[in-house]
Amino acid sequence: MTNQRFRYLFFVPGLLLALFQTACVDKTTPAENDKMLARVQNRSLYLSDIEGMVPPNIPAEDSILITNSLIERWVREAVLLQEAELNLPKDFNIDKLVRDYRSSLVKSNYEQILVAQFLDSLITTAELDAFYESHKDQLLLDEPLVRYYSMKVPATAPDVNKAEKLWNNFEKEGNKEELEAYANIYARDYQLQDSVWEEISKLSLDFPPGYLNATNIKSKRSFVEEDNNFRYFFRREEVLEPNEEPPMSFVEPKIKRLILHQRKQKLLEKKKEEMYQRELRQNNVEIFR
């Protein structure tokens, strides 16, 4: 199978969902010239059902392959659906489930519209600080947090030995700036900002297994290691332990999400109450007791 043909087949599962929405019912009045492609008891698949699902302007053999794949998958899904319907519990109310699901989708869509129109997304520094101070207990660290510098440079990069000498004299004036210029050109990945914190579990993924973990992080102030492909540079500046308070720079994105979530909930409750009171005033609400 060619790569092009494989790309076509990649979309078949997605097409099948759309196909089932229109084809997995009994067509009692198909078009006179519509060709039936498959049947599973009272469910029929017609040529018109897959119209537009086969990419145009492709080789005939690819078109046949995709069509056959759609038919085969439709048949299998139709058999499964038939069996599922035969084994439905007596108390299974599919109409109620559909109504509930539709109501949920409609309400969710309208809530998104309300949020987009009315939610104030501006968060001040004072609000961030106030939330941080009042929720410290919920923000305590679950694992070690590291403030660090790092570089990952291809082993064959030019002047990599010179970069290592600069790294080993990191605190010398001008060396950090020279390393930043070097990393910007040659490094596959690097972190040379002063106030970046990362959880050790995530940071360790940037290094070969065993190079860096919660056990050895405190014993490794600075190192340069190499494997067949890369040279790894690391320098630890500070470590915070579990249950310590995190720096604001690390938890700020989380705090913003929490503040916006609170605002969203308050906004939606306010809008719901306004709608309710409006309908009451207009005598559109009756409660029968």
Image: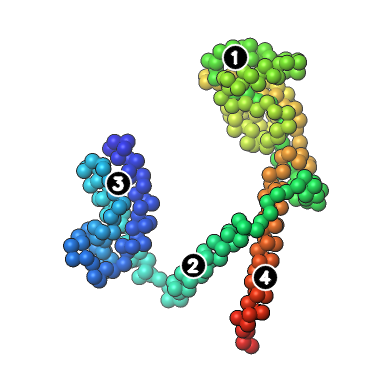
Q: Is residue 38 visible?
A: no
The three-letter amino acid code for the residue at tag 1 is Val
Three-letter amino acid code of the residue under disc 4: Glu
Foreground disc of the pair 4, 2? 4
Q: Which residue is mark 3?
A: 55
Among numbered discs 4 and 3, the one appearing first in the sequence: 3
Q: CA distance from mark 2 to mark 1?
A: 60 Å
In space, the residues marked 4 and 1 are separated at their CA atoms by 66 Å
Disc on the earlier residue, 2 or 3: 3
Q: In the figure, 171 relative to 77: above or below?
A: above
What residue did someone put label 4 on? 274
Q: Earlier in the sequence, mark 3 or mark 1?
A: 3
Category of crowding for the residue at label 4, using alpha-carbon neighbours closer than 10 angstroms: few (below 14), some (14–19), many (at least 20)? few
Please name the residue that numbered disc 1 is placed on.
Answer: 160
Numbered disc in front, either 4 or 1: 4
Relative to 220, say whether 103 is above or below.
below
Q: Which residue is mark 2?
A: 102
Badge 1 density bin: few <14, some 14–19, many ≥20, Cα 10 Å? some
Task: Estimate the x, y position of residue 11 in percent, counting from the top left.
Answer: 36, 47
The amino acid marked with disc number 3 is Pro
Q: Closer to the observer: label 3 or label 1?
A: 3
Q: Is residue 4 left or right of residue 218?
A: left
